[in-house]
Image (tube, rainbow, N blue to C red):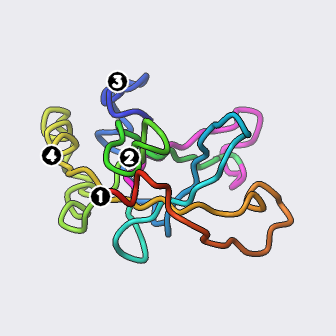
Amino acid sequence: MPDEDVEGAVGGDPVAKRRVIIPAAGYYEWIATDAGKTPFFLRGESDVIAMAGLYELWSDPELHEDDLNRWAWTCTVRTRPASDAAGYVHERSPMVLPEPFWRRWLDPNSTDMGEVKAMIDSVPEPHLEPFGVSNAVNSLECGQQSREHRPESARAG
């Protein structure tokens, strides 16, 4: 969910009330070139990045109220414009939360949209490093990924 959609399609409820942290080692993006798409794995400075997310519950009206399968949990990763090395790979990146933001992001009592927007605006830009990976990452049969190289633009600076 893009950062400009703070109030969202449902009056801001997910941003105000249903925030989650999605832990990940990193994520994949592809650069389109004349030769095709080149995959990159972007990772943070530590082993795990904490991506800001939102969750929602959806009910299947055809199932009985007591049916545990009636509810589906879904989530989305909030995104924002990318800069530094991540901006070379893709114009947007996940909103990565540094550890000092975790408690505030997950606080169920923090529902004021002004305060939530101020928190989102104060999250610093992450420092993500892109690593070129094998095209095998596109295959469901891929058993391992190899880190091959960083793009030239990520090496500078």
Q: How many marks?
A: 4
Q: CA distance from mark 2 to mark 3?
A: 12 Å
Q: Which mark is residue 122?
A: 4
Per the rendered image, the range of residues in magenta is: 51-69
Eyeballing the image, is 46 above or below 4? Answer: below
Q: Are marks 1 and 2 in contact (CB under 8 Å)?
A: no
Find residue 18 and report its horizontal and vertical position in percent: 38, 46
- Per the image, the residue denoted by label 3 is 11
Q: Nearer the viewer, residue 67 or 142?
A: 142
Of the 4 image quadrants, the one containing the N terminus is top left
For this view, does 22 lie left or right of residue 65?
A: left
Amino acid type at image mark 3: Gly
Q: Which mark is residue 18?
A: 2
- Lower sequence index among marks 3 and 1: 3
Q: Residue at x 43, y 38 (%)?
A: 92
Q: CA distance from mark 2 to mark 4?
A: 19 Å
Amino acid type at image mark 4: Ser
Provide the secondary structure element on which disc 3 rests. loop
Q: Which mark is residue 97?
A: 1
